[in-house]
Structure formats: structure tokens, C-alpha cells
Image: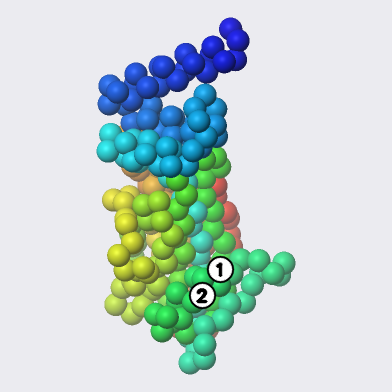
Amino acid sequence: MPTRTRQSSMSTTLKRASSQGSGEGSAAIAELHEQGLGFTKSSEEAKTWWELAAKQGYDQQELDVRCFTRTPDVGSLTCEPLSDGSGCPTEADLQTLRAASVTGRLKPTGGGGGRSRLGPKARALIVLDHRITSEERLKQPRHANIIYIQHETGWLLLPTNAPLLDRPIVLSPQPCTSVYYGRRAGRRWLDNRRRLCCVEITSQSDISSSVVRHSHGPS
């Protein structure tokens, strides 16, 4: 079967599935619009189909989670990069943190995301400055970039009005402050115990960190 005929047949099948309420079908059409395969390449069209897929109960995204320790300091917020010079937040992220009166020194401790495209991109930066004593759950961003900042009484979310999903980013205290996030199982979202980063915090004023293992996240 010629390639164009196969693409036309696939397009028809996916549109039929979408019209019958299949979020998976709508998400597949969104992907094809982004890639320009069988459909006109258009990020706006892709966004429309992603929104439809979400309304149909299939809200996928490619989430990247990055972890940092923060050593308290009265000076302006700075970041100590990895040995190759990478790992620090973008300058825009640093400005967002400074605008929220966050000070001290950040050190990247790793992170990870999806192995392949799973929808619109999203990113969560997690900044820790002390140990947690029990499991904590933070909500994933929805197609947006956010920052979670740990403080004595909980977590500060930046921006404060960021769209969130009812899916977890899980922080576990053992064997270190380990960070995971949910994986898809049909229409359900389960914990994915493949560690994204491991943060070892010895005390409020003496923070050390080591990346134990990076994960590529849910598949």
C-alpha cells in the first residue's frame, strides 16, 4: 500500500476513534499534527487536539522533573553547577526565585523525564533545604513550568496560579529524599517507583547531595 494511502487510512481511523470519544485517538492526531505526518504540521492544531484528548480523559504530557538543594544564605540566590557547568536553573527561573525572596545557594542533584514524547512539555523544579520525615505528594504541572520550594511549614508553588493535574510527584524519605512521579495504567495513574533523583540532606546548615540514579520516567 502506498505511503500516502496508508497515511490517509490512518487519519480516517484516528478521526473516527476521536469522534467516538477516544482520547487516545485525539492524542495521536495531536502528535501527527506536531510532526506533520498525514496532517498539516501545526502546533496550534496539535494544541486543539491535545485539549480534546484531555476532555476525553487522556491528558498526556512529557514531564521533566529537576531537583536542587538550597543552602540558606542571606546573600542573593546563586547556583553551583555540576562539574561540566550544567544543571542550574535558567536565568528566568532564578529571577522568579529571587522575586519570591528566595536566597542561598542552589546545587543540582539530578532529575529526569520521559523516554519519548508523551504530549505537551511540562517541567517541575523541586528545591529542598531539609529532610522530610514522611512521604509527601506534590501535584504535577499541567503543560506548564513550575517551581516547588520547600520551607518549614510546607511548599511554595511558583507561579502560584499554575495549572496542576491530580497526579503525584512523590517524595519519599528513604533511603534519601527520593523523587518519583506517576505513570499511566490505562485511565488510572499509579506511582512509578523509578527514582528520578536522590537528595541527601544532613542538616539545615550542612547540605550535601548525591545523585544515586536517574530515571527516564514513565513509559
User: To which residue does mark 1 refer?
Assistant: 90
Residue at image location 31% in from the left, 51% down from the top: 165
Count residues near mark 2 (Cα–Cα under 10 Å), then give few for <14, some for 14-19, many for 20+: some
Residue extending furthest top? 1
Q: Which of the two residues, 57 or 133, is positioned nearer the viewer here?
A: 57
Q: Nearer the viewer, residue 78 or 214?
A: 78
Q: Nearer the viewer, residue 129 or 203?
A: 129
Q: In the displayed structure, would residue 178 be above or below residue 11?
A: below
Q: Amino acid at mark 1?
A: Thr
Q: CA distance from mark 2 to mark 1?
A: 6 Å
Residue 160 circle label: none
The image quarter in which residue 164 lies: bottom left
In the structure shown, which secondary structural element does the residue marked by tag 2 occupy? helix
The image's mark for residue 94 is 2
Give the residue displayed 48% in from the left and 33% down from the top: 33
Q: Is residue 197 visible?
A: no
Tag 2–tag 1 contact (CB < 8 Å): yes
Query: Residue 166 at x, y = what percent?
Result: 28, 51
Quadrant location of the N terminus? top right
In the image, taking residue 87 as reference, residue 130 lies left or right, namely left
